[in-house]
Image (cartoon, coloured by chain):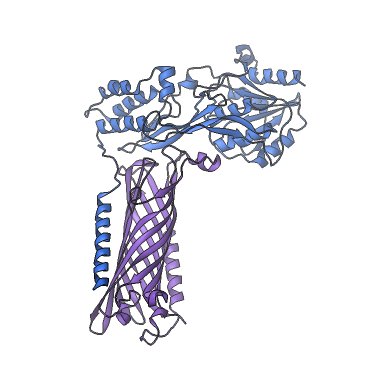
Chain colours: A blue, B purple
Amino acid sequence: MKRTSSLATLLTWLISLSTLLLTACVKEDDYDNSKRGNFEALWRLMDEHYCFFDYKRQELGVDWDEVHTRYAAQVNEKMTNAQLFEVLCNMLAELKDGHVNLSAPFDYGRNWSFYEDYPENYNDSIARLYLGHNYMIASGLKYIVLDDNIGYVRCESFANGIGDGNVSAMLNALATCHGLIIDVRGNGGGQLTTAHTLASHFTNLTLDIGYVSHKTGKGRNDFSAPERLTLYAATDGIRWQKPVVVLTNRAVFSAANDFVNCMKHCPGVTIMGDRTGGGSGMPFNSELPNGWTVRYSAVVFYDADMQHTEFGIAPDLPLSMSGADIAQKKDTYIEKAREYLLSSK
Amino acid sequence: MATAAMLMLSLSVWAQDATPLPSPTGAFPANKEVLHSSMFGIGWSNILDTYLAPYNYTGSDFRFQRETTRMTNLWHAHVCNQRLIDVNFATTDNRAGNHDEYAGGIRYSQGWFYNFGRGNVVNPAERAASPLSLAAGLAATGYLGGIYMVRSGNNPAQLKSSLMVEASALATFDMKIGRRHYVWRYQFSLPLMGIAFSPNYGQSYYEIFSLQNDDRNILFAYPGNMPSMRHRLTVEIPFRRAALRLGYVAQMNQSTFHHLKYHQYSHDIMVGFSKYLYRK
């Protein structure tokens, strides 16, 4: 009898708990796949996840609530998908962030003013003359010894992995050079770990290169305490000990921007060229009810002085491509870098 | 490919079980009885993980379950031990049908159940004093899995991992038709407390794994932030010296860690075999 009673109590508890759990459903937020619904979903997604609102308000005067008011008035149910896409892209463009994109089957919304509004300071046809035909390639790093015994390395992207073995093999091949030019102009980024792997071969010491912070909630100011970012000297392979010039332009973005930030702290390294394009937020992806993909900056990377590099890093030695040099099929950046390295022998 | 692998695993486990052993005549002590079962299932899954996407993804679900339940000497042979391995894989897409998401994982559970009265949930057809047998107890359950979103980016996947103490209840009913025993089994499991992994709201896996920056990524889990449960209903249809086992499994995993919402509701129709064995 006692056991039956205990059993009944146990079953009552389990049934009650089960019922309670059925009412505690974790559900998706209400959504509405209309023009207005997609607009609101995008605005709210950015509102709850984007990491630079304070900085963009300070630098650009962007008030995200005011943005909502202004663009909501442009949305109606009669507009076409293309028109909605345009309105949404214009709204996102207010943030002037190359990591903020809206992707639909028919277009890729972006604001690439970080480099489109500035001189390119790079001519691919001319730069290729320096590489010639006999350059070597180590996992995407193209390199050659120029005729004045300066090593020239072209690093177009960090999208593909570059290992310590690749970097060491390249540095070994260039070991007798007086100095090294690392040309990252036009490098739009890729993997941070790849950028750090390459940079780690240019320091003998552990360097504090910045801080990182992520959002901890939906509030615009909900951020974690900044954590220190460290660049560790490569322990596997060769570490370069001679002078280095890193060539930059406005199209140096994202992980490449971070690479320049790392190199700025390395001894014997000079950053030469134009300001980088920035893009210091790590982007995340999400989506709208209609399936369009949204990309946004989610994690903030600061420099070692806790300053944003979202709008780029200034070079140590500013440079512009000379029209006269271009006419003579010379790359001003590479020529100046060679002069600089030879003068510092 | 995963489906084929699960099927092969299921068949190989079954082949292992098919070794001839003494029939369940009741001549053996009750605490020597073991129930082995392997089932493969197919069904439907609904996944929400707001770290990856704010909306539900739905699609097909595949499941493999391997169960071993045996009576023990504990508490005057009233306690049985259940070992349950559950492998799950789901392939889903969003409402627009333009993004795919895959989820999978393995759950391992070790539970101890007290058999009430003269019940025997391991082999009710041979042992129980009445057709209905009931047992309840606790289980230690570990889960390791993940969700992968095909679109690229810095948040393409989500790791799912937990170690929980669960309350669980088992009921068996021996339905005798003619000389045949059709054994119905129902099991309900409820995670009570434990630890679970979650990234913080906007934390990247680069920070967690490459930089090793922890931000309360191992959390105390309880029904308030992880209200989950599992149901399993099976029936054994005697077939020569074993039994064909048909079933239904409902798995409702939910959590709300760091303002991130997650659920995976899976419903699977299961089919497999079970067999009673006797340990020496």
Position of residue A165 measured from the top left corner of the image (x, y, whole percent)? 67, 42
Q: Is residue B251 visible?
A: no
Which residue is outermost to the top?
A324
Q: Residue A252 or B123: which is nearer the viewer?
A: B123
Asked if A41 appears above or below A53 in the picture, the reply is below
Asked if B10 appears above or below B216 in the picture, the reply is below
Left or right relative to A30: residue B92? right
The structure residue drawn at horizontal position 28% and vertical position 48%, both measured from the top left corner, is A25
Asked if B124 appears above or below A18 in the picture, the reply is below
Total numbered badges shown on the rendered structure: 0
Q: Is residue B223 visible?
A: yes
The structure residue drawn at horizontal position 42% and vertical position 59%, both measured from the top left corner, is B141
Position of residue A122 measured from the top left corner of the image (x, y, whole percent)? 58, 21
Q: Residue B29 or A91: which is nearer the viewer?
A: B29
Which residue is outermost to the front?
A2
Left or right relative to B62: residue A116? right
Query: Which image quadrant is residue A330 in?
Result: top right
Query: Which image quadrant is residue B181 in?
Result: bottom left
Position of residue B254 measured from the top left corner of the image (x, y, whole percent)? 34, 50
The structure residue drawn at horizontal position 39% and vertical position 23%, both measured from the top left corner, is A93
Left or right relative to B142: residue A125? right
Query: Which image quadrant is residue A3 in?
Result: bottom left
Q: Quadrant of the C terminus of chain A?
A: top right
Q: Quadrant of the N terminus of chain A?
A: bottom left
Position of residue B216 measured from the top left corner of the image (x, y, whole percent)? 46, 42
Asked if A322 appears above or below B221 in the picture, the reply is above
